[in-house]
């Protein structure tokens, strides 16, 4: 999404330019997102929980990746970190009226809801939505009081393309998440059906 949002500006569409300080900070935020995604696959980096998710078993012989509590905590911490980084990103690129990334506040909570692991997550989801709303409010004040460093909307042609690309990437991500959940439910249904058929055969045998 960050790459899609900055792509028209990097190409200079409609005469768009980005100050080097803004450009490199956006790239740095993108690198943080990539590291958040990659860390679980690097056994020798990060705390024990993250190392455990890469594959090594814990003392009980169970992979931490199979521990719903550990996975749940990582999901929520990732979402909260995303909101903090997103708020900073919106701040430096123009607030709620001038940043192509402002609409992503609604995407972060929806992703967390799609990967919910149990009823315990419902209360956390409300808090995540609250913090997303707080980020939207902060974005409004960034624009209202001109607490911004660069107004991306000052180049309408690049801004239109950027906003469209970011939205399309967001929609694609949601579609992928829905397909993953759909696939998981299909597997669960097949397993339940197989157990039911096996139980019926056992009953006939007895």
Image (cartoon, helix red, strand yellow):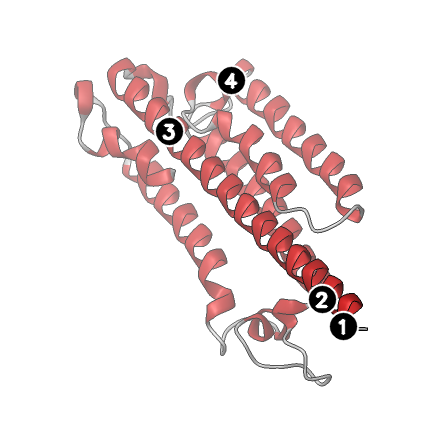
For marks 4 and 2, give the CA distance: 67 Å
Residue under numbered circle 4: 143
Residue 128 lies, in percent from the top left, at: 69, 38
Residue 165 lies, in percent from the top left, at: 33, 28
Residue at left offset 45%, top offset 53%: 32
Residue under numbered circle 2: 201
Q: Are marks 1 and 2 in contact (CB under 8 Å)?
A: yes
**Circle on res. 168:** 3
Residue at left offset 75%, top offset 34%: 126
Callout 2: SS = helix
Residue under numbered circle 1: 205
- Sequence-wise, which precedes: disc 4 or disc 3? 4
- Sequence-wise, which precedes: disc 1 or disc 3? 3
> Quadrant where the N terminus lies?
top left
In screen coordinates, is 3 left or right of 57?
A: left
For marks 3 and 2, give the CA distance: 49 Å
């Amino acid at each position: 999404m960050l790459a899609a949002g900055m792509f028209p500006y990097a190409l200079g569409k409609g005469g768009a330019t980005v100050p080097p300080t803004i450009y490199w900070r956006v790239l740095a935020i993108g690198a943080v997102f990539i590291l958040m995604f990659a860390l679980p696959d690097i056994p020798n980096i990060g705390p024990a929980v993250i190392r455990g998710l890469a594959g090594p078993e814990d003392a009980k012989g169970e992979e931490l990746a199979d521990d719903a509590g550990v996975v749940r905590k990582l999901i929520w911490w990732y979402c909260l970190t995303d909101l903090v980084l997103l708020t900073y990103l919106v701040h430096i690129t123009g607030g709620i009226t001038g940043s192509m990334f402002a609409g992503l506040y609604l995407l972060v909570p929806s992703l967390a809801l799609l990967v919910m692991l149990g009823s315990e997550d419902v209360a956390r989801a409300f808090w995540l939505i609250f913090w997303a709303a707080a980020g939207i409010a902060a974005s409004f004040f960034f624009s209202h009081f001109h607490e911004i460093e660069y107004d991306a909307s000052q180049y309408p042609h690049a801004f239109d393309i950027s906003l469209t690309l970011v939205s399309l990437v967001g929609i694609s991500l949601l579609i992928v998440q829905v397909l993953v959940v759909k696939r998981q439910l299909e597997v669960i249904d097949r397993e339940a059906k197989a157990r039911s058929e096996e139980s019926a055969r056992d009953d006939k045998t007895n």
